[in-house]
Amino acid sequence: MIGVHWMFKEHPRLASARLRGRIPFGILERNGLIRSGEDVVIAAKHNWKAEKVRKHFKKMVMDVCDDHFWNQHAPHYKQACELADVVTCNSLAMSDVIKTHTGRDAVVIDDPYEDEELPPSIGEGVLWFGHSLNLPDLDAIRDKIRYPLTVVDSSNYTPQVLDAALKACRCTIIPTGIKQAKSANRAIRSIRYGKYPVCGHLPAHEEIGLGKSDLLRELDFAMNEDTTNDVLSLQRAIRERFCPEKIAKDWWRVIYSITH
């Protein structure tokens, strides 16, 4: 077995910690392929010293799932990508950002879904959920939403609160802003819950057939039409690509490639 240390995998409030840490790590561990150890570090985020981490482990993977190459954290991400044996990321758009700022070719590994697939259901109102840092995207259109809106952000999030909100809503809304390198994890989660996600423009959304129409017009459609068949079609489209076992295999290929 290969000893792997997956940074930030124990932070339950971070979607990336679950999707890019705890879920794939757990699958690989249960299959006897990896264990906790110091052969490989899967590094992520910031506020840690890249040189110190690199020296402590035999091999280093830098996983980039947020575009911080434009702010005060840019030097850290550039250095970490330079020091890493392999750079990974969560979307094709993010791989382009990494290439532009570091010259490195990143391996794209999708975020897996984490929920059981529920049948389509039509509840009431619109749900926005996500990290509070993404609230400006919602605030930019909040006054134009003509339907009851529920918000679950970092201030009121618990797994139970989000579970109840997803089951109760008619649709979710995922507006987007200038950051176009994000994954489609919130849309995927909505679809797994049997809800139609009204998505803003984002390359990762468009890859699964969403985010190509005017957001508010799409919201009117979702709130006033039967979206059952649309949701069933979306569930079929994501079922294999974002399967946790498939994503774990993608991670295993990266880990194996730098240790053999």
Image (tube, rainbow, N blue to C red):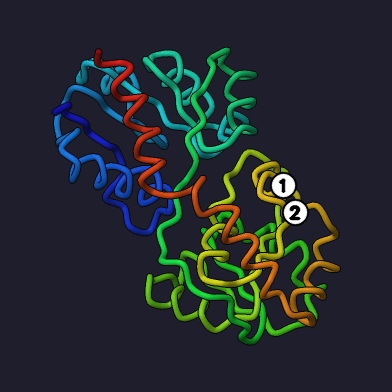
Q: Seen in the image, is 60 located left or right of residue 166?
A: left
The amino acid pointed to by label 2 is Gly
> Label 1 near label 2: C-beta < 8 Å?
yes
Taking 80 as reference, is 169 above or below it?
Answer: below
Quadrant position of the N terminus in the picture? top left
Above/below status of 39 relative to 43: above
Residue at 60% across, 43% down: 182
Residue depicted at x 52% and y 61%:
189
Above-or-below relation of 84 to 43: above
Report the number of discs. Answer: 2
Front-lying residue, 174 or 224: 224
* x and y percentages locating residue 200 in the rendered image: 74, 55
- Secondary structure found at label 1: helix
Compared with 167, 159 (above or below) is: above
Q: Quadrant of the C terminus?
A: top left
Instruction: Tell me the tag on residue 136.
Output: none
- Which quadrant would residue 81 be assigned to in this image? top left
Question: Callout 1, which amino acid?
Answer: Glu
Q: Is residue 107 left or right of residue 232?
A: left
Asked whether 177 or 40 is in front, the reply is: 40
Q: Residues within 10 Å of mark 1 (few under 14, many from 20)?
A: some
Q: Residue at x 57, y 36 (%)?
A: 91
Question: Residue at point 78% right, 66% down?
Answer: 141
> Mark 1 = which residue?
206
Residue on which the image places disc 2: 211
Q: Quadrant for residue 85, please give it.
A: top left
**Which SS class for mark 2?**
loop
Mark 2: few, some, or many residues within 10 Å (few <14, many ≥20)? Answer: many
**Residue 66 at what x, y percent from top left?**
53, 39
* Residue 156 % position (x, y): 45, 73
Residue 17: x and y in percent read 36, 48
Q: Nearer the viewer, residue 48 or 91?
A: 91
